[in-house]
Amino acid sequence: MHGAGGFGAQCGLVEGTLLFLGIISRAEELPDEDIEKSCQDFARQFEAHFGSLQCKVLRPQGFQPNNPPHFCEEITRDGIVFSIDFFNKIIIRAT
């Protein structure tokens, strides 16, 4: 999602995880309050771990035409692992 299309807003790693969290939670028929709490927990933990939710902070050089396509590879990999760990903790709490 490239920080709102390169605008530098919320990081796509955050947006994608929040979308997935909402879809899965709705499918499990969780109450809105629980979904909101999980989304807030994820955002709070992501920000604490990575230092921000904003693409313009996580990628301060922005999106330049000459950037290699794998420019965010390291944070993408780390963000995916972070999200998987977050979901695993939710699953463990639910069981």
Image (tube, rainbow, N blue to C red):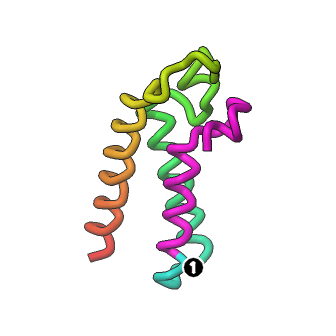
Of the pair 48 and 60, the residue shown nearer to us: 60
Q: Position of residue 52 (x, y in %)?
A: 55, 30
**In the rendered structure, which segment of residues is drawn in magenta?**
1-25
Of the pair 88 and 72, the residue shown nearer to us: 72
Q: Quadrant of residue 60?
A: top right
Report the residue at 70% width, 39% height from top: 5
Q: Position of residue 71 (x, y in %)?
A: 46, 24
Instruction: Read off the residue under disc 1.
Output: 31
User: Would residue 75 be found to the left or right of residue 14 on screen?
Assistant: left
Report the residue at 58% width, 16% height from top: 66
Q: Quadrant of the C terminus?
A: bottom left
Overall secondary structure of the magenta section = helix
Q: Position of residue 72 (x, y in %)?
A: 46, 28
- Asked if residue 28 is among those painted magenta in the image, a careful observer would answer no
The residue under label 1 is which amino acid type?
A: Pro
Q: Position of residue 21 (x, y in %)?
A: 50, 64
Q: What is the secondary structure assignment of the residue under circle 1?
A: loop
User: Would residue 95 be found to the left or right of residue 43 on screen?
Assistant: left
Report the residue at 49% width, 54% height from top: 17
Report the residue at 50% width, 81% height from top: 27
